[in-house]
């Protein structure tokens, strides 16, 4: 497996480059800015971007999509219930005083059970609403890794104080979709350090009373 992480954009989003070590095909997850640097890193890996995938459509995860898509011509994959948020990324940015380019129209709207591939590397789509209506997690069982966006972070959970968020739904998503994965699964979040499912089950104060 090819695997690289890069912190991008004004709010320090974790962007992941992941894919097939043999075919050098990669997916870029959440290019929230620094598109040129992401593309340069892909080139130093002698890899080719075959898909851009968003865990959700909050503007800080979307900001580099337009430029990266133009540079790579890769198709864009977004959760099917995230359409409305994706359409208003410019307005989301305005609330933070940040200019956000409009997002391109996705080629693929993802639903639970869909699989996104780069060569022989595959990410399985899990619907995990709550932090946003169309948040998705991307699971690779073979390597025991899951990309969770802003649903679950080391020692904390995603914010639910934005419009279209639901605290109850978020906890349900974590309990039924993430905490059912093997304890050793490595969890890569949209912000902050990596953790594991087992560690969060044991130590995360936000989910302790609910799981
Ligand atoms: Zn978010």
Image: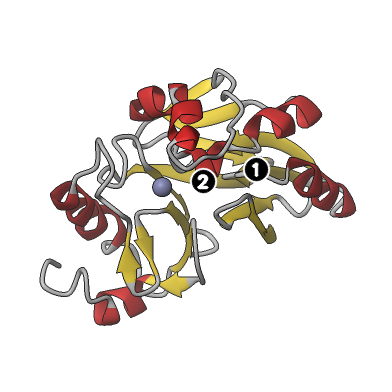
Q: Is residue 190 found left or right of 81 in the rendered image?
A: right
Task: Name the residue nearer the viewer: 27 or 152.
Answer: 152
* Pointers 2 and 1 in contact (C-beta within 8 Å): yes
Q: Residue at x 66, y 41 (%)?
A: 118
Dot 1 alpha-carbon crowd within 10 angstroms: few under 14, some 14 to 19, many 20 or more:
many
Task: Name the residue nearer the viewer: 146 or 143.
Answer: 146
Residue 29 coordinates in the image, percent (x, y): 58, 46
Q: Which residue lies most toward the front here?
A: 97
Q: Is residue 38 above or below residue 196?
A: above
Q: Along the polypeptide, which appears first: circle 2 or circle 1?
A: 1
Tag of residue 27: 1
Q: Residue at x 35, y 68 (%)?
A: 182
Q: Which residue is mark 2?
A: 123
Q: Is residue 58 above or below residue 11?
A: above
Q: Dot 2 lies on which element?
A: strand
Whether ligand 1 has any atom under 8 Å from the Cβ at mark 1 is answered as no
Residue 123 coordinates in the image, percent (x, y): 51, 46
Dot 2 alpha-carbon crowd within 10 angstroms: few under 14, some 14 to 19, many 20 or more:
many
Image quadrant assignment for residue 119: top right
Spatial separation of the CA atoms under disc 2 and disc 1: 9 Å
Residue 133 coordinates in the image, percent (x, y): 29, 35
Q: Nearer the viewer, mark 2 or mark 1?
A: 1
Q: Residue at x 43, y 37 (%)?
A: 95
Residue 162 coordinates in the image, percent (x, y): 28, 43
Q: Dot 1 lies on which element?
A: strand
Whether ligand 1 has any atom under 8 Å from the Cβ at mark 2 is answered as no
Give the number of marks.
Answer: 2
Image quadrant assignment for residue 53: top right
- Quadrant including the N terminus: bottom right
Q: Is residue 15 found left or right of 202 in the rendered image?
A: right
């Amino acid at each position: 497996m090819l695997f690289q992480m890069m912190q991008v954009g004004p709010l320090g989003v974790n962007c992941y480059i992941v894919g097939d070590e043999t075919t050098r095909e990669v997916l870029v997850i959440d290019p929230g800015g620094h598109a040129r640097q992401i593309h340069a890193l892909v080139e130093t890996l002698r890899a080719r971007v075959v898909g851009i995938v968003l865990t959700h459509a909050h503007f800080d995860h979307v900001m580099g999509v337009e430029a990266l898509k133009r540079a790579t011509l890769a198709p864009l994959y977004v959760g099917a219930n995230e359409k409305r948020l994706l359409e208003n990324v410019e307005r989301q940015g305005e609330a933070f005083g940040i200019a956000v380019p409009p997002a391109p129209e996705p080629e693929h709207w993802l639903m639970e059970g869909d699989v996104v591939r780069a060569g022989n590397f595959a990410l399985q789509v899990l619907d995990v609403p709550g932090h946003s209506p169309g948040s998705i997690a991307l699971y690779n069982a073979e390597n025991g890794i899951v990309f969770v966006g802003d649903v679950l972070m080391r020692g904390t959970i995603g914010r639910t104080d934005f419009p279209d968020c639901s605290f109850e739904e978020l906890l349900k998503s974590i309990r039924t979709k993430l905490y059912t994965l093997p304890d050793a699964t490595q969890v890569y979040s949209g912000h902050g350090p990596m953790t594991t499912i087992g560690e969060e089950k044991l130590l995360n104060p936000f989910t302790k009373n609910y799981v």
